[in-house]
Amino acid sequence: MPRPILRRFLHIWAAVLTVCLCVQAYSMLQKGIVTYAFSDMFINYSGGFVRRGLLGSMLLWLNAAGIDPVAAAMTVCIAAFAAVAAYIIRQFIRRGYDVAVLPVCFLLGSAGAYGFSFLRRDFIILAAFLIIMQLRKKLPHGWWIVAGNALSVITILTYEPFVFFSLPFFILTTRLHTRSWLRSVAYWIPSAAAFLVCCKFSGDKAVYDAIWASVSGILPNPGIMDFFLKGSFDVMKFHAKMNFFKADCCVPNLLTSLVSLTAIVYYCINAVPQFARRRIPDTFRPRMLLLLLCTILGQAPMFICLSTDYSRMFVYATVSAFIMLFSLSEEESGKLFPPECHSLADRLLLRFDRILPPSQAGIILVMLFIGVAAWTSLGITDFMQKSGIGVVWRTATLLFY
């Protein structure tokens, strides 16, 4: 099929997918909140200091002031998504990248594919990451470290998974200035300390009872807060079981996740060069690969035993990688990783290209058939529902049945 036809199909399919994702998100908002996931935003300090409690405490203050905390939480989620989406779309347009590659479930399409209620704090912490990286252009290096740590600590107190994808990038970016690994790590000790404090105060039944008493008039049920009733080791065993030993329709969840991850890496390193409106530098693919590998490895503890929400972790990886790419100059991008890493990326690309050759048809196939299960426990079934075809099918069912 000639290249112009594939490009035209890409644009048509992206438009259809965007409409479907908007319908999905609107329907979710109209029906109300899926409280099992959304209630996570209302964890607060009513029972004492606890991880993730900052945002919930602020929502309680708004409630005391007569402002609807549910509406406020939804507004913050939507505003954060809109800010990140606007930034990425603007950068794509400026660089001659085709924005039609963005509305997939592991990039900006995640908002519609999962509904804003599923997002919880995801784009809030990605927006915080974007702000910190943009402040680097506005402030002297020392002041950026101070401001970055302050915003990072606030974000970690809001949602501690922030540290897994952001801190490696902050350290690498700092090293561009200090040229010292030791000093670069030391500068971000306050953020790491905030994360360790959150790990220490992970909550128990007494905390759960106090939090639920404070929000029972706001939410119909505690939802995901019930994890406070389980021991930390039990929670890790649960996540490890779902991630590695559970199957759906006789297909291991681990295999489904590996297919999603492989397709995402293939898509992110190839979609832009394949459909760009102008020539993309040869350095784009190896640098994007390194950024993706860095953030995926940074999130390794979550992949193993701290979360089953691979869909959100993949969004953290792809969006933060693009933010990093856009926040650094061409020279800085080349110096972000040691030379050995660039050599490794070149070798990996050679092997990857032999197995999965980059092509426009391959990108479109990923857009059509590759999804990410919202939770690994949902397996192959949700994987298909979150693919492009699955989103369109669910939207058609929603509209006509």
Image (cartoon, grey):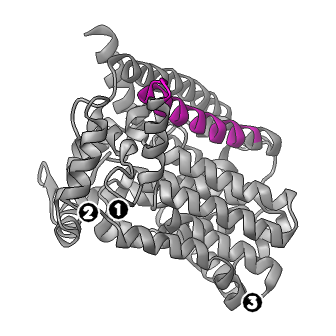
**Distance CA(mark 3)–CA(mark 2):** 38 Å
The quarter of the displayed image where residue 64 is located: top left
Residue placed farthest to the top in the image?
A: 400
- In the rendered structure, the answer to whether residue 72 lies left or right of residue 8 reads left
Q: Which residue is mark 2?
A: 254
In the image, what residue occupies the spot 70% across and 84% down? Answer: 338
> Which element type, helix, strand or loop, lies under badge 3?
loop
In the image, taking residue 223 as reference, residue 92 lies left or right, namely: right
Q: Earlier in the sequence, mark 3 or mark 2?
A: 3
Residue type indicated by callout 1: Leu
In the image, residue 66 lies in the stretch drawn in magenta:
yes
Residue stretch rendered in magenta on the structure: 65-90
Q: On the image, numbered disc 3 is attached to which residue?
A: 180
Residue at (23% x, 63% y) in the render: 239
Residue 258: image tag: 1
The CA span between labels 1 and 2 is: 6 Å
